[in-house]
Image (tube, rainbow, N blue to C red):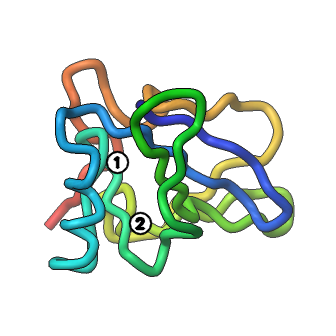
Amino acid sequence: MISFEEDDRGLVLLYEVENNDPEWASKRLKDDGEVTVSNGFTVESTDLLKAPSKRGGEDPVYEFRFAEKKAGYYRIPGRILGCDHDVLIAVKGIRLERKTFIAERNIRIAARTH
């Protein structure tokens, strides 16, 4: 499950493990330096804010830096969304959730173009 929280620097992506292996994301971060969660958000080990914690359930919750806040916008690195350019979204006026970025059939909305 994906959710977002705002902190004083910007947005944090919270990822609660959705499969039977709660350590799979940690293994992928350690081995590959990055992991794609929820079929569309590719984060790097440098985006990890702190070690996974258990929040309200049995599965660990990973916290990743998702966006920096500057001048009334969130700047999301394009690499996280699978596109070539950073994405700017206004701080006010839009509720950010998984479906803002991932279509119903697990297709990235900001797809990479070549």
Q: Amino acid at mark 1?
A: Ala
Q: Nearer the viewer, residue 72 or 40?
A: 40
Residue at 16% of width from left, 78% of height from top? 31
Alpha carbons under labels 1 and 2: distance apart: 9 Å
Q: Is residue 58 above or below residue 26?
A: above
What is the x, y in percent for residue 95? 68, 29
Quarter of the figure with residue 39:
top left
Q: Residues within 10 Å of mark 1 (few under 14, many from 20)?
A: some
What is the x, y in percent for residue 64? 52, 61
Numbered label attached to residue 78:
2
Quarter of the figure with residue 88:
bottom right
Query: Total label count?
Result: 2
Contact (Cβ within 8 Å) of mark 1 with mark 2: yes
User: Which comes before the other along the chain, label 1 or label 2?
Assistant: 2
Residue at 84% of width from left, 57% of height from top? 72
Q: Is residue 62 left or right of residue 66?
A: left
Q: Is residue 17 left or right of residue 52?
A: left
- Residue extending farthest front: 58
Numbered label attached to residue 110:
1
What is the x, y in percent for residue 51? 50, 65
Q: Mark 2: which secondary structure?
A: helix
- Residue extending farthest top: 104
Q: Nearer the viewer, residue 24 or 43?
A: 24
Q: Is residue 31 left or right of residue 13?
A: left
Quarter of the figure with residue 27:
bottom left
Q: Amino acid at mark 2?
A: Gly
What is the x, y in percent for residue 114? 14, 67
Q: Mark 1: which secondary structure?
A: loop
Numbered label attached to residue 41:
none
Q: Is residue 16 above or below residue 85?
A: above
